[in-house]
Image (cartoon, coloured by chain):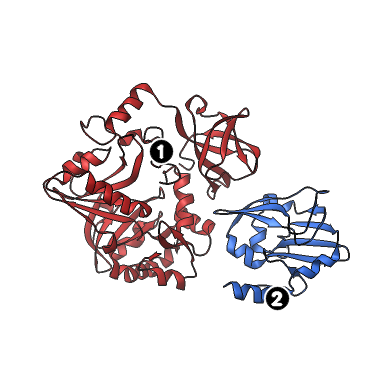
Amino acid sequence: MQIPEELFYSEDHEWILVEGDEATIGITDYAQKELGDVVFVELPEVGDEFDQFDDFGVIESVKAVSDVYAPASGKVIAINEELFDRPELINEEPYEGGWLIKIKLADKTELDQLMDDQDYERFLEEGE
Amino acid sequence: MKKTPLNQVHRELGAKLIEFGGWEMPVQYTGILQEHQAVREKCGLFDVSHMGEIHFAGPGALATIQHLITNDAARLKVGQILYTPMCYPDGGIVDDLLVYRLGEEEFLMVVNAANTDKDFEWVKDNSFEDVKITNQSADYAQLALQGPEAKNILQQLTEIKLDDLKYYWFERGEVAGTEVILSRTGYTGELGYEIYLKTEDAVRVWNRLMETGKEYGLLPAGLGARDTLRLEKKFCLYGNDIDENRHPLEAGLGWTVKFSKKDFIGRETLLKYKEEGYDEKLVGFKLIERGIARHGYKIKANGEDIGIVTSGSFSPTLRESIGLGYVKREKAGIGQEIEIVIRKRPVAAEIVETPFVK
């Protein structure tokens, strides 16, 4: 199970990579394994805004439909359009080619409510 | 939750286990898409020990079976198998099942796991004289070996001449030195076999099949792939596409209802439907826009409600989004443009010919 140390994590198994006041969001390696083969992704549009922990998109595997939740509030500045043709990138590279959206962060203090890699690892162990 | 004799084997193979019909079953091992592809192109091995087996024996066995099912078991020779619905008097489906003619006066019904207890009560309550009916579900394990390589793999482990075993026939004999009922049936639309065996033999036969199948590309396959495989062939799934509120005619199972038979439960109602018509029909559709249809989503045409989705998935073979649903018969033609309502948004789809995968 990969849990990169430079990311923050939510209890809904999203990750967020913060660079200045911008951030990239995706789902974790654990989440993609739980979902199984991803075959469909629905993402917001550039310019959409949402609050922390709001659902902003949908990921569907062969068997399951899952909402994805925003680890932080913000405004969408980019979406990963490649996923529309290659949703399997979420399984293959959850932290790289499988990223979902980039946002402009509304409030960086919200990140305090997320877990770092070690907290997330413990969180997964407790959930087992 | 009930466990099949292969539960520990599944765990060791790293399967993801889920509850299905009261049983803990593997939904996938390596991944649904990969397992699906193995079955279409090479071979897959499924544990389907959750299926129920109800045994009928005695001079009244045939008459009782004939009364219970819509298809005609009198046509069966010993060694032959029949697919049939079993209906309530109002035509609603109790279950869909296989009938094996084990002897002149001996039959085995193979039923859906979740329906086993309900079916057993139903058949006992509606049986005639001189027949002993036993729920033997706990005695049987069942393996399904499915895919174009199935024969080549299985032939190495049995003396039964597989070239002579026809579709929907079975033989008793040995596989890997174990007494089995070997049946040329399946739920994938591929060449394949279903093997009924004693629970205590299941692990050994599973392992022998896996070893022998290795060089042929055999993979263990779970319920997830079983579902996408059957959907591509438009095989109905009880609880999704058919249930007590649906009758065989609207489900496209009219070929299994034999009105030439003078008596069976549901005959009167079904005959009325046949003569006077019914409102809806089970159809197959493909999505034109992006999305995946799921059980329970609404179907519309020009903004008006015309039906409901009963099964939907991404088709691994076609790489398209497909589904089944009941729609009003006047809107059920091939080429009819429809919309599937996905998360409140209408998504364009089209009614197509089935099976989706020929």
* Drawn side of residue B273 relative to residue B337, left or right: left
Amino acid tagged 1: Asn
Task: Bin the neighbour count of mark 1 within 10 Å (Cα to Cα): few under 14, some 14-19, many 20 and up.
Answer: few
* Drawn side of residue A20 relative to residue A12, left or right: right
Q: Is residue B208 above or below residue B182?
A: below
Residue picked out by circle 1 = B245
* Circle 1 chain: B
Colour chain A appears in: blue
Nearer the observer, A3 or B305: B305
Amino acid tagged 2: Asp
Q: Position of residue B35 (x, y in %)?
A: 49, 59
* Circle 2 chain: A
SS of the residue at dot 1? Answer: loop
* Drawn side of residue B342 relative to residue B100, left or right: right
Residue picked out by circle 2 = A119
SS of the residue at dot 2? Answer: helix
Q: Position of residue B49 (x, y in %)?
A: 35, 61
Rounded to the nearest angstrom, the CA distance separating label 1 from label 2 is: 50 Å
Nearer the observer, B79 or B98: B98
Nearer the observer, B220 or A76: A76
Q: Are marks 1 and 2 on the same chain?
A: no
Nearer the observer, B123 or B206: B123
Q: Residue at x 47, y 70 (%)?
A: B13
Quarter of the picture containing the N terminus of chain B is bottom left
Labels in figure, total? 2
Question: Chain coloured red: which letter?
Answer: B
Tell me which corner region of the image, top left, top right, bottom left or bottom right, holds residue B72.
Answer: top left
Q: Find the residue positioned furthest to the top.
A: B276
